[in-house]
Image (cartoon, grey):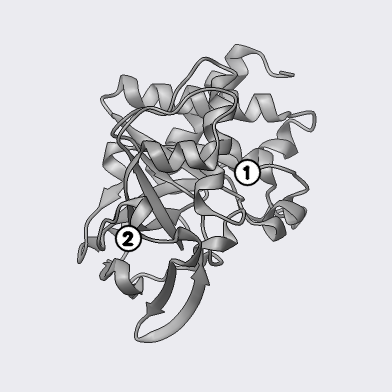
């Protein structure tokens, strides 16, 4: 159910774009709109992404977030969320990522599914996802906050409705490592070790994503089917993090080791 009219949705989308461009987050939406709903938040996200496409950006895929049970309980929800991946969000192995692209960036360890065939319908299963996937590849998602993570007046942390409106916090992707066909590996046991400045900070297994990393993609295909939308061939779908989000400081150097799926590095340049 929507509580915001279209004018309010469009205004907030403009404000989120300005917050990203100026690197100054706006106040949490629920402080201004206490009756904000899930439908409102997705409407804001859609309006913001539509404005980016109108400005020349291309949709290259989707991301799924809040896939762990612990995160869903923390946010008081029972399903994941999703956002959009645009062409200017992608970075390569070894790249120095501009620090001035983000406000308060963090990184998460994930697997990316690159689709070879479309996925649609309200009965999509994990098996359907594996059949439609051309290959799976290691990925690091960069997340950010265009609304305040902590409200300056109340000290309240932002909730899922703020995050969803904010494109599910998605801000960048490092896509690297060795692509594998999904039938060539038990994806539940795909693991990673994330080093920051030579120190191991995070480790995890992809089974931490809803029991199987393809489960979130099946959920997303079913969710989109309600609106007559399919996940398209060629799209990159981030399946969800299987580590906690790690804060980034300008100058940090990262190395992600995915074992048989390869390893890669990236760094963040100084802001300013």
Question: Image point 32% across, 60% down: which residue?
Answer: 99
Question: Image point 61% across, 53% down: which residue?
Answer: 210
Residue 9: x and y in percent read 58, 21
Residue found at the very far bottom of the displayed protein? 199
Name the image quarter holding residue 137: bottom left
Name the image quarter holding residue 6: top right
Residue 133: x and y in percent read 36, 41
Please say if 25 is above or below 185: above
Residue 250: x and y in percent read 35, 70
Question: Image point 66% across, 56% down: which residue?
Answer: 150
Please say if 261 is above or below 146: below
Please say if 67 is above or below 221: below
Residue 46: x and y in percent read 50, 24
- Judged left or right of residue 203, residue 199 is left
Residue 12 seen in render? no
Label 1: how many Cα within 10 Å (few below 14, some 14–19, many 20+): many
Residue 42 seen in render? yes
Quadrant in which the C terminus appears = bottom left
Name the image quarter holding residue 269: bottom left
Quadrant in which the N terminus appears = top right
- Judged left or right of residue 217, residue 76 is right
Report helix, strand or loop for mark 2.
Answer: helix
The number of numbered discs placed on residues in the rendered structure image is 2
Q: Earlier in the sequence, mark 2 or mark 1?
A: 1
The residues bearing labels 2 and 1 have C-alpha atoms spaced at a distance of 28 Å
Q: Which mark is residue 99?
A: 2
Viewer-side residue, 151 vs 56 = 56
Q: Mark 1 sits on what residue?
A: 80
Label 2: how many Cα within 10 Å (few below 14, some 14–19, many 20+): many
Viewer-nearest of labels 2 and 1? 1
Viewer-side residue, 124 vs 160 = 124
């Amino acid at each position: 159910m929507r509580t915001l009219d279209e004018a309010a949705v469009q205004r907030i989308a403009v404000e989120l774009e300005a917050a990203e461009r100026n690197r100054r987050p706006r106040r949490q939406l629920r402080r201004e709109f206490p009756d904000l709903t899930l439908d409102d938040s997705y409407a804001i996200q859609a309006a913001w992404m539509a404005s980016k496409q109108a400005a020349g950006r291309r949709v290259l895929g989707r991301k799924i977030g809040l896939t762990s049970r612990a995160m869903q309980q923390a946010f008081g929800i029972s399903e994941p969320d999703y956002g959009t991946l645009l062409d200017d969000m992608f970075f390569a192995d070894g790249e120095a990522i501009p620090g001035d692209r983000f406000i308060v960036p963090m990184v998460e360890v994930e697997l990316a599914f690159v689709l070879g065939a479309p996925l649609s319908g309200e009965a999509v299963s994990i098996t359907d996802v594996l059949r439609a996937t051309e290959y799976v590849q290691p990925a690091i998602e960069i997340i950010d906050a265009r609304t305040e993570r902590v409200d300056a007046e109340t000290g309240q942390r932002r909730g899922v409705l703020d995050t969803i409106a904010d494109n599910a916090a998605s801000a960048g992707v490092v896509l690297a490592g060795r692509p594998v066909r999904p039938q060539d590996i038990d994806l539940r046991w795909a693991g990673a070790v994330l080093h920051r400045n030579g120190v191991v900070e995070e480790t995890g297994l992809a089974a931490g994503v809803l029991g199987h990393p393809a489960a979130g993609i099946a959920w997303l295909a079913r969710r989109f089917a309600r609106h007559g939308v399919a996940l398209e061939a060629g799209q990159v779908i981030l399946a969800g993090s299987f580590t906690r989000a790690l804060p980034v400081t300008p100058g940090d150097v990262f190395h992600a080791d995915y074992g048989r799926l390869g390893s890669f590095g990236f760094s963040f340049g100084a802001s300013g």
